[in-house]
Image: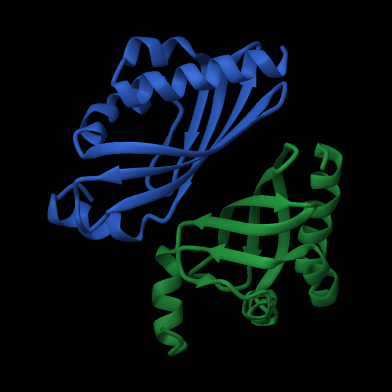
Chain colours: A green, B blue
Amino acid sequence: MTTATTRTTVRAYHRARFQGDIPAAARTLGESFHFQSPLVTSDSTHQHLGGLEAFLGIVTGVDLVSELYSESEATLIYDVHTSVPAIGTQRTAEHFHLTDGRIDTIRLIFDATPWHAVMQAADLS
Amino acid sequence: MTTATTRTTVRAYHRARFQGDIPAAARTLGESFHFQSPLVTSDSTHQHLGGLEAFLGIVTGVDLVSELYSESEATLIYDVHTSVPAIGTQRTAEHFHLTDGRIDTIRLIFDATPWHAVMQAADLS
């Protein structure tokens, strides 16, 4: 695969995910899939994308800070603006590894500090 | 500047910083410098590098997961192993912006959750 393929796939995932287009996001993910974040670890694309709708319910905007690509990897840096005052703007890094043009690993990195109080309040913890 | 210049500068910063070689790290930073992390914001290279020694005191190893470069940007993903059980391994993303081959902005992203308790215990908060 080429850097251009990586860019196309990761941009499609990023766009679909924040538009809530779960089928389009799912098409960019491989059959083998692994997701890690400070709050969740998952080996299931279904589980990963299943949590998207609730998250998008609090997202008011996304500013892409940086996108860097290689033949098999990408890292996006972006700020997610939310409607939850305790969370505010969440600066996020997302690292993708791809095999055969599909995303097989996502590492999501952000400061989860404010989430713990919000999840406790919502009894999600 | 070229992608190769960015790679050379950012790798030099990364190596010097984890070796505690503050003069070598300082040589990669621009006169105008801005640093943002979940715990600290600084516009001073002196202040930024001044905190390094205390941090390195708890670092037992670093595993680089990914490095991606362009002409004016880079993002590293790495796992910092620490000797502090409450922190453990800190997955970190670090985004660099460069001007004229020197780093002028660093955005450090990690889950600061465990740090708050550690800093309170050490009365650093």
Could you tell whether A78 is left or right of B63 in the image? right
Residue B93 percent across, percent down from the top left: 51, 43
Q: Residue furthest bottom?
A: A123
Residue B69 percent across, percent down from the top left: 66, 28
Please name the residue shown 69% across and 75% down the image. A56
Please name the residue shown 41% across and 21% down the image. B15
Residue A39 percent across, percent down from the top left: 46, 70
Q: Is residue A121 above or below residue B117?
A: below
Residue B18 percent across, percent down from the top left: 34, 26
Could you tell whether B34 is left or right of A63 in the image? left
Q: Is residue A112 above or below residue A101?
A: below
Q: In this orientation, which residue lies closer to the viewer: A114 or A75?
A: A75
**Quadrant in which the N terminus of chain A appears:** top right
Could you tell whether A82 is left or right of A3 in the image? left
Please name the residue shown 45% across and 43% down the image. B37
Q: In this orientation, which residue lies closer to the viewer: B10 or B109?
A: B10
Q: Quadrant of residue A125?
A: bottom left
